[in-house]
Amino acid sequence: MDPTCTMGLCRFLFVVVFFLLPDAAPLKIKAYFNDTADLPCLFTNSQNLSMSELVVFWQNQEASVLYELYLGKEKPDNVNRKYMGRTSFDWENWTLRLHNIQIKDQGSYQCFIHHKKPKGMVLIYQMNSDLSVLANFSQPEIIEISNITENLCRNLTCSSIQGYPEPKKMSFWLKTENSTTVYDGVMQKSQDNVTELYNVSISLSVSLPAVTSNMTIICVLQTEPMKTELFSSPFYIDPKVPPFQPPDYTVWIATAIPLTLAIGIPLILRYIPCRRKKKKQPGVSNERETIKMERGESEQTKKRVKICVPKSSDEEFQCVVNSSEIPSGNRNATRF
Ligand SMILES: *[C@@H]1O[C@H](CO)[C@@H](O)[C@H](O)[C@H]1NC(C)=O
Ligand SMILES: *[C@@H]1O[C@H](CO)[C@@H](O)[C@H](O)[C@H]1NC(C)=O
Ligand SMILES: *[C@@H]1O[C@H](CO)[C@@H](O)[C@H](O)[C@H]1NC(C)=O
Ligand SMILES: *[C@@H]1O[C@H](CO)[C@@H](O)[C@H](O)[C@H]1NC(C)=O
Ligand SMILES: *[C@@H]1O[C@H](CO)[C@@H](O)[C@H](O)[C@H]1NC(C)=O
Ligand SMILES: *[C@@H]1O[C@H](CO)[C@@H](O)[C@H](O)[C@H]1NC(C)=O
Ligand SMILES: *[C@@H]1O[C@H](CO)[C@@H](O)[C@H](O)[C@H]1NC(C)=O
Ligand SMILES: *[C@@H]1O[C@H](CO)[C@@H](O)[C@H](O)[C@H]1NC(C)=O
Ligand SMILES: *[C@@H]1O[C@H](CO)[C@@H](O)[C@H](O)[C@H]1NC(C)=O
Ligand SMILES: *[C@@H]1O[C@H](CO)[C@@H](O)[C@H](O)[C@H]1NC(C)=O
């Protein structure tokens, strides 16, 4: 036989192999949690076959059937229970719509089209797609953990809920008039074991005596996979206004003492820097880090905002964040 084939036959073989090859690059599709995913078949009915000759069905990676159209009629017999009532077929463009998408629906799907002939079924078309599911995190929200006995610190928590996939980075931006310091917090995350959505949060403890000018704190969540940044509303710290005054009227009286301290102690404290203590256990990271905030033009006017982060200490006037440590590599300051 002639080893070279005719152009027509080669193209025919190519087309058949291309469409029937099970590991042809799958089409990547995305859908939002609780929304609808379009699982396409992209079948161009070039032979103008009638639906009454075709068997069309979709299955998932475990070969569970989502939907079957048997000779033009819906056939639920083979459909897996978890897909019952969740699908609708779009006759216009051979697309199966899967409703109420869950994180568990991530994975690959296949659409098959068989031609039913008197001799039997012939697979004439197959298409693979990969579905990934997204859920938008809520806008990050900064809340203050009020505790009037710890008036020298402002404890802030920033949280964002019900998102997917897991984000990689969450930060506080501490802005003063002339500078911005970025503080990458240690992200606490929890995953719902039913919906598989994530809640994330970071904490920050700001030593008030070190805040000498108005400070604006913004929380930023960087979500995957697009690296979109979500910003919280700004949280203001005015050094002249003591914490927990408005809007919590119940702590009015109790605030009187902290207020006195807040006015009187800053001067003293300015000269008691939040110095690193000797580690008790070598190798265990249990230390405070000081983030410098550059202000003014000259190096001499450099002042400090203390962000004190030990797990435990007996030192006075100390701000403690219970759950997080600042790894020393996670600091950086941006000057405007
Ligand atoms: C899912 O969508 C329905 C209506 O479209 C809505 O009522 C429900 O709250 C949503 N659930 C979640 C978890 O977003
Ligand atoms: C199929 O058509 C519907 C509307 O008829 C549209 O919403 C959907 O995006 C289409 N899907 C594809 C894969 O073209
Ligand atoms: C496809 O077949 C239908 C009838 O089954 C016919 O009306 C239509 O013209 C045909 N289209 C083409 C492109 O052959
Ligand atoms: C999710 O966020 C993106 C932009 O960040 C937006 O385009 C999309 O509509 C949002 N989707 C939902 C379901 O909220
Ligand atoms: C406030 O702090 C004290 C001790 O520091 C603790 O016993 C108390 O439970 C805290 N209250 C709140 C509301 O966190
Ligand atoms: C996430 O936050 C929501 C709202 O605060 C809460 O209802 C849910 O239980 C949280 N889920 C997890 C896994 O922490
Ligand atoms: C979720 O996980 C927690 C702890 O792992 C468990 O106690 C709880 O029963 C689980 N809930 C469900 C609905 O599986
Ligand atoms: C600090 O903020 C207060 C309002 O919160 C404002 O009245 C004051 O002028 C601000 N000070 C500076 C130096 O910007
Ligand atoms: C910020 O910079 C301006 C001029 O660059 C200076 O006048 C001002 O005092 C600085 N503010 C602070 C709080 O250092
Ligand atoms: C700040 O957080 C630390 C550690 O969780 C806690 O000991 C302290 O009481 C908190 N202070 C306030 C004002 O909530």
Image: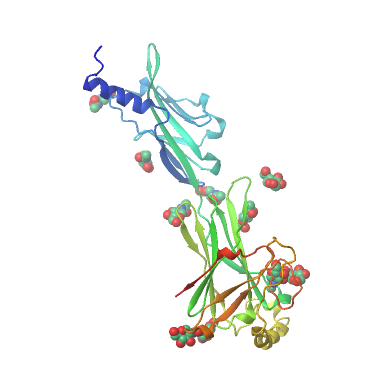
**Outermost residue, right direction?**
314
**Outermost residue, front direction?**
282
Q: Position of residue 314 (x, y in %)?
A: 77, 73
Q: Quadrant of residue 251?
A: bottom right
Q: Is residue 95 left or right of residue 174?
A: left
Residue drawn at the location 50% of the way across and 54% of the way down: 136
Foreground residue among 314 and 12: 314
Q: Is residue 265 left or right of residue 33?
A: right
Q: Quadrant of ligand 10?
A: bottom right
Q: Position of residue 234 (x, y in %)?
A: 52, 71
Q: Quadrant of residue 235?
A: bottom right
**Outermost residue, left direction?**
7
Q: Position of residue 186 (x, y in %)?
A: 61, 61
Q: Is residue 265 left or right of residue 176?
A: right
Q: Quadrant of residue 38?
A: top left
Foreground residue among 124 and 67: 124
Q: Is residue 224 above or below residue 261?
A: above
Residue drawn at the location 35% of the way across and 35% of the way down: 93
Q: Is residue 299 above or below residue 319?
A: below
